[in-house]
Amino acid sequence: MSMTMLTVFQIIGVSAAYFGVTLALPWILLGGKFAQLRTAARFMACFVTGNFFCMNLVFLLQLLHISNRFTLVAGTLAPFIAVAVRRRQACLSALEKGLRSLRVVSEGEMGVKTLMLRTGRRMRKMSSGWLGEWLSSRWPDVLLTLGILGMLLYIYGVNAVNVYGYCSSDMVLHNYWINYMDQNRIFVDGVYPFGFHCIIYYLHEVFSVPVYVLLRVFALPQTLMIHMALFAFLKLVCKSRYTPYVGLTAYIMWGILYQYTYYRYYAPLPQEYGMMFVLPAVYFAIAFLQKKDILSGDGKKKKTAKDARLLLLLFAASVSLTLTVHFYDTIMAGLLCGGIAVGFCFRCFRWRYLRRLVLAGVTGILIAVLPMAAAYAMGTPLQGSLHWGMNMISAGGEDKEDSGENAQKEENKSPGKTEAGVSWKSLGTKLDHVLGEMQYYVTNDSRAAAEFMLGSVGVLLALGMLWYILRRPDYGAVLVSVGVFMGIASILQASAKLGLPQLMEVSRYSVYIGYGLPIVWSLCADAAVYLLFRERKGIHIGGLVMLGAACAVVLLTGLRKPVCISAYESNGAVTCVTNILRENPKGATWTICSSNDERQMIWGEGYHYEMIQFLRNLQKIGEGVSVTIPTDTVYFFIEKVPLLYLDYMNTIRPEKKVSLKGAATELPKSGGILPYIEEERWVTMSHMYYWARAFQELYPNEMEVYYETDEFICYRVRQNGYNLYDFAIDYGYNK
């Protein structure tokens, strides 16, 4: 089987496992509880509940040091067992009916063909019954949704099945953290939001999928879910059935967005994983505020209060998940809640609404903080990223205050200007800064595109105010809420130039702004259609017209093409790791000598020898030092075209080949990952390549080529454990 086909099957298997646990199981168990919700809201509720349960189950078992496959499976089945016990009569009746059917077949009273015929008739009746009725009015939606999924698979799937290595340098560190969870050592590198790692560990432990495989292929199902969360949100807030596709189509296929707004989707990273919970938090808060009366009472009021409590629970769970996965997502969720406070100011600041929302939000944050606080209380220090984030915010605030004071001084130097003139000039300068940063970070360096994006936010705010006037405050509030958030995010992206505190890396804002733009565009189109048709049937026709216009604009102004980015590990290296793990039986000993990436990938299976350490040991040949590796087999991974390991966007194709010039250059003296980046990696790989050539000349039968492409070569040496080879030879460039 080719590696491409294997990757396809791995993606399908991992997707089925993830969606089954986090979506299908909650749908089966809690379908009745969520029955009053719309389909898109039920979808959100199920995947929020599924992820919340899995993450916190792993946290609990890890902190108790009893996490393994048995306890995880038992914990997963526990809610189903509890429901079965509570409804034992119904469950026993269903079991009895099933056993009766089996008995009838086993005793020959009914043949297998008859059973299959009856089952087929029932399925046909079901498909032509409620399923056919459901599809009859929704087939355009089904086709358009399949089209959205097809576009996503085309844009992101091409890379997933053709690039086998990790598409982010962070993956090695995440691999290391997850590996130690096998030993119940969560937070091995310090306290950090570990929700993403809990999900990967759960899939690894329960379904026996190697961690490195999950970190290779999980990006695609994760990206699908991120976009499906966006799609579900738009379906819930738009009035027309088809305007949600306007923004979503533009976001997936339009070529005006800068690549950094979506390139992080090519790797399964915690920040992007947490993005799928931001919009559910926003929707459940909005849905709660749209309840006209949340007081308990009789009849309708009592039902409203029950529905409100469910929405608050889902809001708390969504907020908790954002912080459990990544604090940047919590910051964005907080800014969105700020936008909601402005949009729904007529209801949000009523005490009976405000206190419930605040209590639910605080509860969600406390749930997320509890596992980290427990680990910290037991002596685990904070992970370095948390210190860095807090220091960046603190330093950013000080720097920006100084720059703000300097800017004000410059404005005050202008003589002969009225106060109003200075104010307008200052406002124009700040707007120019915002547009400039949006042009640089969000667009393909197009001023017109930046003006269009910021202008669409302004149009959304104006439409929201118009709907206030037209006495549709709940609808107008949604438009204003999104518009306020996008305005704040755009301003914060220019925080370095506006003298504002820097809450996160400036480039990270572009990911969230890009994710928010389809909401802006869909709501602008929806508000215009709703203005023309109100609740009349033509509103859906108007939505289709808007979708057609959006597709025409995208086609005329430039389509986005799928990208195969340069991974941080070559396809050849991943292919060899996969084959080595499959071919070597339990009990066999083997070692991979390579750069540092493979160390975590082969955790618990084989040994790893650091390439730079191997080469440095070879330099001591004059001191009588021998270099031996005490395993049955040794594999040497060498890149003939060394990767550009620190390319900022990981998009530049490496072209520089190993050479005698590189081998003649002195080995890097730095430690850690530094010998494997850019020019240093070229030097390291050149030394390794010419050592391998020299060793092969000495031992042509023992030093065999295991795998080779134009960019990569793997050598294999089989040896007798009682008579090891000495790899310390003079290859001409030891000094």
Image: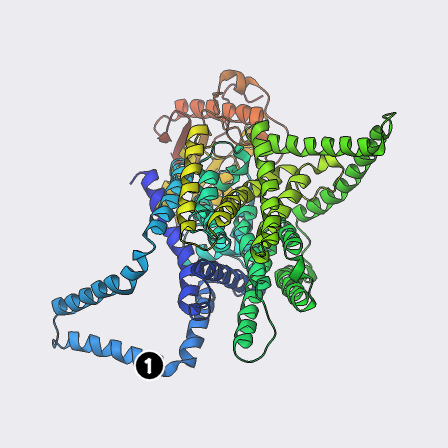
Across and down, in percent, residue 701 comes to: 34, 28
Task: Using the image, determine if residue 489 lies above or below residue 136.
Answer: above
Front residue of 642/524: it is: 524
Across and down, in percent, residue 156 comes to: 42, 39
- Report crowding for label 1: few under 14, some 14 to 19, many 20 or more residues within 10 A (C-alpha): few
- Residue 251 visible at all: yes
Task: Check disc 1 and report the residue beneath it.
Answer: 92
Q: In the visual, does 199 lie left or right of 160? A: right
Secondary structure, mark 1, is helix
Q: How many marks?
A: 1
Front residue of 230/638: it is: 230
Point out the residue furthest to the top here.
Answer: 661
- Residue 631 visible at all: no
Q: In the visual, does 497 lie left or right of 50? A: right
- The C terminus - image quarter: top right
Across and down, in percent, residue 140 comes to: 34, 49
- The N terminus - image quarter: top left
Q: In the visual, does 143 lie left or right of 665? A: left
Task: Using the image, determine if residue 503 lies above or below residue 237.
Answer: above
Amino acid carrying mark 1 in the image: Leu
Residue at 57%, 19% in the rendered image: 665
